Amino acid sequence: MRTIDWDDEDNSVVLIDQTKLPKEFTVLEFKDVSAIAEAIKDLKVRGAPALGVVGGLGIALAAQTSNAKGPKDLIEDLERAAKILRDTRPTAVNLFWGIDRALNKAKTGRSVTQIKKIALDEAKKMADEDVQKCRDIGKHGAALLKDGDVVLTHCNAGKMACVDWGTALGIVRSAIKDSKRIKVIACETRPLNQGSRITTWELLQDRIPVTLITDSMIGHVIKTGEVDNVIVGADRIVEDAIFNKIGTYTLSVVAKKHGVPFYVAAPSSTFDFDKRASDIEIEERDPSELKYFGKEQIAPPEVKAYNPAFDATPMENVSAIITEYGVLYPPFEFEEILESWQRRKG
């Protein structure tokens, strides 16, 4: 099944609860925008492309559940819902992109019925597009991998971070589909262990060879020649940096030091063409995530803890960015990239 979807029978958003993996496979149903917002905060749904789609579906849900009698009141309801969704997580740009795309499209409607239909159609279209974008990213990225390569990845940039297929892991899947023998090394990705909990689970489901390591082992496995490529996803790409899960910057430094290609896989919606690294707020999460592993206390409760969710990797550490439009190589000239994509979109 898709990781995120719309249930036409119940007029609801359904998604896989990522916090339960790998122990439980649980599908959640949402009929309230505030509940979706809490699910985003609690990381029940996470991953940049997934957040973009759930943002759009959140607007669609707000439209379907609104009791507004006129189009003006309905749009006001949607704008309130948009604020609730925007206030969840500050760093991943796809969330805002998805919310704005569905909201702006809904505003073209002239009646309550029309607005509701437009919002839902646009959100569904976004979900379908996400699947195709990931397939295209996979195709372009697979060409960079050789038969027998070992890929190191960080956090989870697979289908659980998207609607299906995945970005970084989508490249692995596509390469294997092309009959290349690919193995994966997955970082555990502390403190919430998206790598050990989700990435390894995904790959084992598809019978893709995967080895789990601690985050502190990356220097050793890269230095000893056990890694051919590093592929990660991205939560926001600005002119001078890639924002991704904390630990990505360190990984990029080690890869560069030892001459290992460091690839970033992300759809075009992850690009924020108007920003630089200094403009971006890095989300800081609850310090308790460092002091507890699940319900088990692993640090003194009174100790001070610093828990940023993301870091910024400078562009000079990036070998290539793989998008649905193809592979981008340094220097990454944002103005030229944007113009090229606008021409392709017509």
Image (cartoon, rainbow, N blue to C red):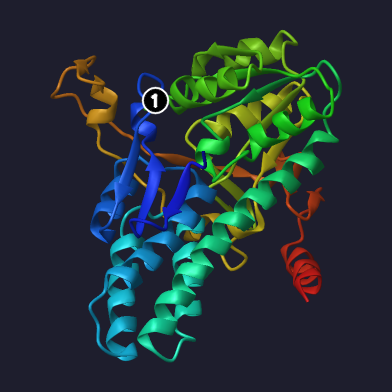
Determine whether the residue tagged by mark 1 lies in a helix, strand or loop.
loop
Q: Amino acid at mark 1?
A: Leu
Which residue, given by chain and number where applicable, does mark 1 sit on? 21
Query: Which class describes the residues within 10 Å of circle 1: few (<14), some (14-19), or many (20+)?
Result: some
State the residue in front, 95 or 245: 95
State the residue in front, 264 or 29: 29
Is residue 92 something that shows in the picture?
A: no
What residue is drawn where x is 25% and y is 87%? 69
Q: Is residue 222 above or below residue 191?
A: above
Q: Is residue 145 left or right of residue 48?
A: right
What residue is drawn where x is 81% and y is 43%? 140
Residue 299 locus on image (x, y percent): 22, 16
Asked where in the image residue 12 lies, by quadrant, the reply is bottom left
- Image quarter (top left, top right, bottom left or bottom right) of the C terminus: bottom right
Residue 27 locus on image (x, y percent): 36, 37
Q: Is residue 18 above or below residue 56?
A: above
Number of marks drawn: 1
Q: Is residue 215 left or right of residue 61?
A: right
State the residue in front, 266 or 272: 266
Residue 336 locus on image (x, y percent): 79, 67
Residue extending furthest front?
9
What residue is drawn where x is 35% and y is 69%? 82
Q: Is residue 114 above or below residue 254?
A: below
What residue is drawn where x is 56% and y is 33%? 248
Is residue 254 something that shows in the picture?
A: yes
Residue extending furthest top?
224
Q: Is residue 56 left or right of residue 141?
A: left
State the residue in front, 193 or 219: 193
